[in-house]
Image (cartoon, grey):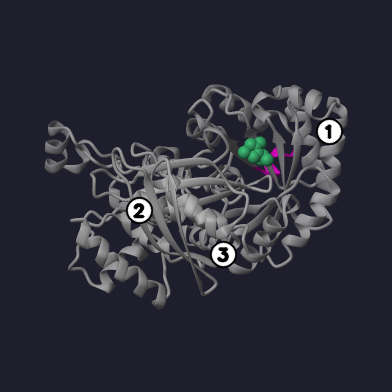
Amino acid sequence: MSDKIFIFDTTLRDGEQVPGCQLNTVEKIEVAKSLEELGVDIIEAGFPISSPGDFNSVVEISKAVTWPTICALTRAVPKDIEVAAEALQYARHKRIHTGIGTSDPHIRYKFNSNREEIIERAVAAVSYAKKFVEDVQFYAEDAGRTENEYLARVVEAVIKAGATVINIPDTTGYCLPSEFAAKIKYLVENVNGIDRVVISTHCHNDLGMATANTMSGLISGARQAEVTINGIGERAGNTALEEVVMALRSHHELGLDTNVNSTRISAVSRQVSSLMNMPVQPNKAIVGRNAFAHSSGIHQDGVLKNRESYEIIDPKDVGIDENSIVLTARSGRAALKHRMHVLGVELDKEALDKAYSEFLKLADRKKEITDDDVLMLAGAHRTNHRIKLEYLQVTSGVGLQSVASVGLNIAGEKFEACASGNGPVDAAISAIKIIIRRQMLVKEFLIQAINKGSNDIGKVHMTVEHEGRQYYGFSANTDIIAASAEAFIDAINKFVK
Ligand code: KIV
Ligand code: ZN
């Protein structure tokens, strides 16, 4: 058995399914290119039948990357498979990922079917996909709760039909590591033809065991791990790429390794977190802000004497440069550009000039510019909105009614309005509504501080309902009233064309 573990990244498919994490095609291409640079073997680029946007993203990612295999997801449905094959037409290396639920609850309630019919449908899907591509991966959805003997029959049948990779998802994140290990071992020992295919793990984190289950699967004979950056994914998420890669690299005795260039991990983690507006929890393994921060005196003392006393990974191995230049108001444009590059962001000259002038304003207000601030500045120039906030003036205070004056620039024309509200954000939003004159309702409104301190940047996430549909808006600013107005405008730009 080979000791190479294939890394199958599904950030752009399973990860992107998370509400609020949707990316546009340009952003998906940016992530796909970073994944290529990181060294992943397979990129699951989308579920083409699900929407024209997903279809288009698979097409464009196929054109944009060279080395990784591009994979497209389907159900065991002929039309899905045809559309996936069409979306993959430009991919240099292509794979169709088709499958069906195999657990009793899926067979009974989702398909109102029986075990024999599910095997027939699985075989038919793989055989049909083989007409379009050589590389066909089959997933047995909810394999985690599928009885091993029946799972082995399904797997044997689809291997006969030509499947090249067999994905064993723990869709509900139910398994214990020992149970998942036993499942993979059972397939290795009982399925005819299993030595001709690659077994894949796809673990969800509902019980916090996604990485443990993935590792158990690999130790038991699986040779592909399905993962996402930062463990992003449905509900509690998927297995985190960085955790599996670094667990394998830290345990040489397993004799297993990947092609991943681990020094890019930190940059890609930040890029995905920033583009998807999904903060990484500070204590997240490998990529959390505190992952390498030692605060207790005993630990600091130990690390200063010898890093290995309390660290099992050298931060440099995951791209954390301890000697990184501290950005202040005296830093030049080149320093800002370099920091952005380290963080995985490339801006063109015009965008960099704008980001730099805002960097100088921010640096005047904050003593030290953090990486999150830099990413916020980079993100501020990524979008090309038709409606822009020109100015915002708010009067508010205890015992006073809040009043806001707003100036908007809509496709080059200036509009102004003034409104009162039950607080400064309400007043600003009411003034914007006077100008836009559409039915709009703020459904969700969340403010987060990026770091700490009263001079910190606030991130605002907002969901706005318009004509029965929900639109997501985001902004970050040291002024949370301005960030709220900008997030509202960001959402409006998605439906006012
Ligand atoms: O969790 C799951 O079962 C999946 C499949 C579609 C592979 O994401
Ligand atoms: Zn999944």
Residue 239 to residue 35: above or below: above
SS state under label 2: strand
- Which quarter of the picture shows residue 421? top left
Question: Residue 359: horizontal and vertical position, in percent?
Answer: 29, 65
Query: Which residue in the rendered view is the most extreme toward the bottom?
Result: 349
Q: Tell me: 75 left or right of 228.
A: right
Point 39% across, 77% down: residue:
349
182 vs 161, left or right, is left
Mark 2 neighbour class, 10 Å CA radius: few under 14, some 14 to 19, many 20 or more: many
Say left or right for 373 vs 414.
left
Within the magenta stretch, is there residue 217?
no
Going by the numbered disc 2, the residue's amino acid type is Val
- Which residue lies under the disc numbered 1? 119
Gap in Å between the C-alphas at discs 1 and 3?
A: 39 Å
Q: Amino acid at mark 1?
A: Ile
Q: Which residue is mark 2?
A: 394
Q: Is residue 272 visible?
A: no
Residue mark closest to the camera, 1 vs 3: 3
Q: Determine which residue is flagged by label 3.
A: 26
Q: Is residue 154 above or below residue 374?
A: above
Q: Mark 1 vs mark 2: which is more N-terminal?
A: 1
> Residue flagged by tag 3: what amino acid is it?
Val
Numbered label tally? 3
- For disc 3, the neighbor class at 10 Å (few under 14, some 14 to 19, many from 20) is few
